[in-house]
Image (cartoon, helix red, strand yellow):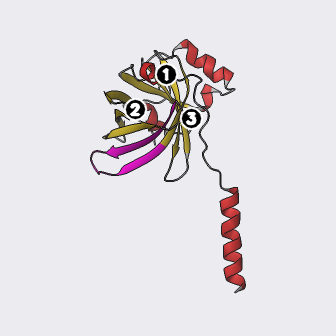
């Protein structure tokens, strides 16, 4: 009996102290039409990794009033072997929360599904966006920076890092990760 009580108590403690991923507020006056106008964006920075995340490209392929379909391509080489992950994602706006989405992605090769909640926390609607994501499966958080140019960091991106008191040096970046030879 004491063992059961101890296990229950431990479970309650673990649940109480587990860090949960909570979405940050989206950018004020979010404009979905303008945001999804950029058809092709590159991930240039990833806060929590893995570092291969900065080898992703995202493309808007279909817009509907109730959802936006995006295609995610992640191609990188590691250990002399090419890795390619293709995903089709459905982004459904959260009711009453402009700039936040429930996202379901299906990995083409395996059919596995990934469920996320996302929030567009900064964007200029043309050159960059900061997108926070929370995994529904394991409650992990990441923040990705999307840019229209994969090689050069748009100057306003550095301004967002500064305003949020984040150091881009502590993030994985496309500048520091060679997608042609990712070191594990």
Residue name at image x 71 percent, y 77 percent: 6
Label disc, if present, on residue 56 of the rendered structure: 2
Of the two numbered discs 2 and 1 on the same chain, state the one appearing first in sequence.
1
119 displayed left or right of 65: right
154 displayed left or right of 39: right
Q: Residues within 10 Å of mark 1 (few under 14, many from 20)?
A: few
Q: Which range is magenta?
A: 99-116
Where residue 24 sits in the image (x, y, percent)? 61, 35
In front: 56, or 141?
A: 141
Q: Residues within 10 Å of mark 2 (few under 14, many from 20)?
A: many
Residue name at image x 37 percent, y 43 percent: 105
**Residue at the disc numbered 3:** 47
Question: Residue 149 occupies which quadrant of the picture?
Answer: top left
Question: Residue 67 occupies which quadrant of the picture?
Answer: top left
Where residue 126 sits in the image (x, y, percent)? 46, 15
Is residue 113 located in the magenta-colored stretch of the structure?
A: yes
In front: 82, or 171?
A: 171
Q: Residues within 10 Å of mark 3 (few under 14, many from 20)?
A: many
**Residue at the disc numbered 1:** 31
Asked whether residue 179 appears in the rendered view, the answer is: no
Report helix, strand or loop for mark 2: strand
What whole-number distance in Å separates the C-alpha atoms at marks 2 and 3?
14 Å
Report helix, strand or loop for mark 1: loop
Q: Nearer the viewer, mark 1 or mark 3?
A: 1
Of the two numbered discs 2 and 3 on the same chain, state the one appearing first in sequence.
3
Report helix, strand or loop for mark 3: loop
Asked whether residue 102 appears in the rendered view, the answer is: yes
What whole-number distance in Å separates the C-alpha atoms at marks 2 and 1?
24 Å
60 displayed left or right of 119: left
């Amino acid at each position: 009996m004491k063992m059961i009580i101890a296990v229950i108590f431990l479970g309650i403690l673990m649940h109480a102290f587990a860090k949960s991923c909570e979405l940050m507020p989206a950018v004020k006056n979010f404009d979905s039409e303008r945001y999804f106008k950029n058809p092709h964006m590159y991930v240039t920075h990833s806060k929590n990794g893995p570092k291969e995340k900065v080898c992703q490209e995202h493309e808007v392929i279909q817009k509907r009033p109730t959802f936006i379909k995006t295609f995610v391509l992640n191609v990188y080489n590691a250990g002399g072997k090419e890795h390619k992950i293709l995903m089709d994602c459905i982004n459904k706006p959260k009711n009453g929360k402009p700039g936040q989405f429930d996202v379901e992605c299906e990995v083409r090769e395996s059919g596995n599904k990934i469920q996320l909640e996302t929030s567009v926390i900064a964007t200029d609607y043309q050159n960059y966006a900061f997108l926070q994501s929370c995994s529904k499966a394991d409650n992990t958080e990441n923040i990705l920076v999307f840019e229209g140019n994969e090689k050069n960091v748009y100057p306003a991106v550095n301004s967002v890092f500064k305003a949020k008191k984040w150091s881009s040096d502590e993030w994985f970046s496309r500048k520091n990760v060679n997608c042609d030879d990712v070191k594990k």
